[in-house]
Image (spheres, rainbow, N blue to C red):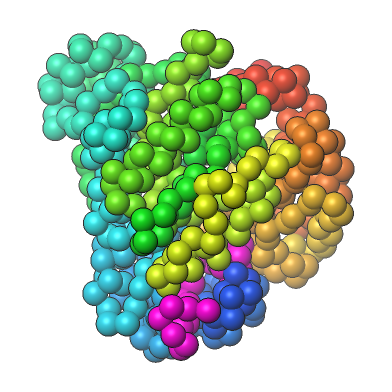
Amino acid sequence: MSSRGSGEKVLVANRGEVALRVVRACRELGLPSVAVFSEADESALHVNEADEAVNLGPAPAAKSYLNIERVLSAARETGATLVHPGYGFLSERADFARACEAEDGLSFVGPSAEAMGRLGDKAEARRLAREAGVPVVPGTDGVASPGEAVGAAEEVGYPVMIKAAAGGGGRGIRVAKDEEELKKLVREAKREAEAAFGDGSLYLERFLADPRHVEVQVIADSRGNAAHLFERECSMQRSRQKVLEEAPSAALSPETRRRMCEAALSLVETSGYVNAGTVEFLVEGSGPEEEFFFIEMNTRIQVEHPVTEMLTGVDLVKEQLRVALGEPLGFGQDDLAINGHAIEFRINAEDPDQSFLPSPGTVSDLRLPGGPGVRVDSALYAGYTVPPFYDSLVGKLIVWGRDREEAIARSRRALGEYHIEGIKTTVGLHLRLLDDKSFLAGDYGTSYLETLLSG
């Protein structure tokens, strides 16, 4: 199937459900796959399902999944020709993409290291967005010191957000309501950003009190073709981490949807971006007063990509692999349409009744939901021990309906069938949300869930 000929092999530089997701896509494309694993993941499902597997080393991610040289060594040992990073770990590390590019005969399944570096730096991404004519949240491209931040904040206006330029997952973000607080929080954010990302660069944005978080899925090939796959509503968040996503947004006007999707494609074209990515926006107001602002671009496949797949019928991971092999997109913009409504529920090994305390342990019993319009992406099985070393996400339930009402009704049924014993999970929280009046009305912003949980 490859324009580069036979002999292609994909190393999957990740773990858990996303690694299994990529392995399955490889199998459908007839591409051999190589799993990598830490000592804690020797019995993981992705290891058993891949054609080959290589032990990266000890359980801590820094000594295994984040060890670039060890991952590249695994690619050399197995003769892999492509590396798919999944999400998390090395997926947005430009130095990893660059290291893959430097290896003879090895390709990175994602954008170029140059594009990743430009768009992964949020301040640089803001500059590119402005160049592409995409509206951005009022703010700065960078601040070097507390004093410089104070001067910038006087122009932007309080309250302001201090954000890490190399950040992700809500790390390195602070909100300052006045000058004194800003000076203190700039120092804090810089320390956190340096510890988390190895880069203490910061920038400021006007703080939007309770916006909606809406993102647009995009993909482009190396032949000049690009398309968007509409938007996802991602406003149901806790500690700036998404809890559930739905597509399309129940609150976005058709005109805003059109302009937002066009803006996302404009950024792709301006930046020369290739492969899958997500352009993220904040939305304020409604109707004629509705405005959207670019905040960042995620240069990888997202956790929530299945909700878009259910909506459009496009297999994004297979498209990623085809694009990395030099092939054109398998569809054009005119081939895509919004079909029904889809919702994704993140199933985390956490106890919502104990401040979302992580709940690693052995799964003693597991029964997964099924039926029409129901998809489960998970690497769990009865007898599997969830290790304490990594992210708490253990599965995703994705439900499709002909409209939002049917998707919600089907979600209640599917969550009711989701049975996991041995660990605590967020299934019960999702069932609660499905009966919440604001969720049912599609009327919620990014601060809604935390307000609900604290009530």
Q: Where's residue 305, x and y in %?
A: 57, 50
- Whether 290 is drawn above or below 358: the answer is above
Image quadrant in which you'd find residue 382: bottom right
Image quadrant in which you'd find residue 247: top right
Image quadrant in which you'd find residue 70: bottom left
**Residue appearing at x 19%, y 32% in the figure:** 142
Evaluate whether residue 44 shows in this view: no
| Residue situated in front as seen by the camera: 27 or 226 | 226
Magenta range: 1-23
Evaluate whether residue 413 shows in this view: yes
| Residue situated in front as seen by the camera: 144 or 437 | 437
Is 5 magenta? The answer is: yes
| Residue situated in front as seen by the camera: 401 or 331 | 331
- Relative side of 203 to 311, left or right: left
- Relative side of 436 to 390, left or right: right
**Residue appearing at x 31%, y 72% in the figure:** 100
Q: Where's residue 206, x and y in %?
A: 33, 19
Q: Where's residue 345, x and y in %?
A: 68, 44
| Residue situated in front as seen by the camera: 417 or 220 | 220
Q: Where's residue 249, x and y in %?
A: 61, 30
**Residue appearing at x 60%, y 59% in the figure:** 315
Q: Quadrant of the C terminus?
A: top right
Residue ranking furthest to the front: 334
